[in-house]
Image: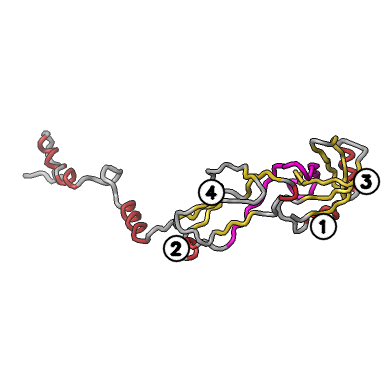
Amino acid sequence: MKELSLAAQPRTEAGKGAARRARMEGFIPGVVYGPEIEPLSIAVKEKDFRAAMRGSVGTAIINLDVGGKANKVILRDIQRDPITSRVMHVDFHAVSMNKEINVSVPVNFVGTPRGVKTDGGIMQITMHELEISCLPANIPDQLDINVEDLGIGESIHVRDVTMPNTRILSQQQRTIVVIAAPTVIKAEEVAEEEAVEGEPVEGEEGVEAPEEAEGAEGAKEAEGEAPKEDGKKKG
């Protein structure tokens, strides 16, 4: 895999005030830690960090020079400003080239699925990276998965993937990608639903049942109520 180079300098001051001053001077505060070293506070030039990370894909081995001492590290965490996205702090994990480490590898999907191209399906991605364990030298930049032969309803699971010189730690039964059937609403069905919704419903205000309307007057006469006269008195 590709290795990157980056220079750093030790930080003798700690605390938020010292970190703020480092940023004002164009540095990114950070820390280097690992099972075989004591945690070390460092600072790297912001422009050097951006240049080193530009174009980097996945987990890369970084040759970190701290005050003239070389360290093999991987970038474990980046803290960014929530508004400006500026890098505020970085964590590096020191590694031994003879011991396996756990890392996450991004998944890269190759090609257009048959079910999408010819049948109008939808490619649903449920995993964008896989967790693996391997020696640092065997860390792949990314995992390429060809999806061109996938049809409607077909999927790829973690158990279907193989990676040389690595152990996949993600759960084997998890789905990585699936081709779902398209969702189609027929115009006729929509029209029928709208027509049904627009019909008056018996019992609603202002709507009488036909039989009740026709027999209303007769019902009043049966109860003893005489129909109203037109107001002219017979002589």
Helix, strand or loop under label 4: strand
Q: What's the distance in space between the residues labelled 2 and 3, CA to CA?
A: 59 Å
Q: What's the distance in space between the residues labelled 2 and 4, CA to CA?
A: 22 Å
Q: Are marks 2 and 3 in contact (CB under 8 Å)?
A: no
Q: Is residue 91 visible?
A: no
User: Looking at the image, which residue sits at the far left?
Assistant: 235
Which residue is disc 4 drawn over?
157
Q: What's the distance in space between the residues labelled 4 and 3, CA to CA?
A: 46 Å
At x 70%, y 54%, the residue is 141
Q: Hey, what amino acid is under mark 1? A: Ala
Q: What's the distance in space between the residues labelled 2 and 1, CA to CA?
A: 43 Å
Q: What's the distance in space between the residues labelled 1 and 4, CA to CA?
A: 36 Å
- Which quadrant would the C terminus be assigned to in this image? top left
**Foreground pick, 97 / 39:** 97
Query: Which is closer to the viewer, label 2 or label 4?
Result: 4
Which circle's residue, 1 or 4, is located before the other in the chain? 1
Q: Are marks 3 and 1 in contact (CB under 8 Å)?
A: no
At x 14%, y 38%, the residue is 220
Q: Which mark is residue 119?
A: 2
Which circle's residue, 2 or 3, is located before the other in the chain? 3
For disc 2, the neighbor class at 10 Å (few under 14, some 14 to 19, many from 20) is few
**Foreground pick, 178 / 120:** 178
User: Looking at the image, which residue sits at the far bottom?
Assistant: 118
**Foreground pick, 16 / 78:** 78
Which residue is disc 3 drawn over?
67
Q: Is residue 169 visible?
A: yes
Q: Hey, what amino acid is under mark 3? A: Gly
Q: Which mark is residue 51?
A: 1
Which circle's residue, 2 or 4, is located before the other in the chain? 2
Magenta part of the protein: which range? 81-110
At x 76%, y 56%, the residue is 2
Query: Which is closer to the viewer, label 2 or label 3?
Result: 3
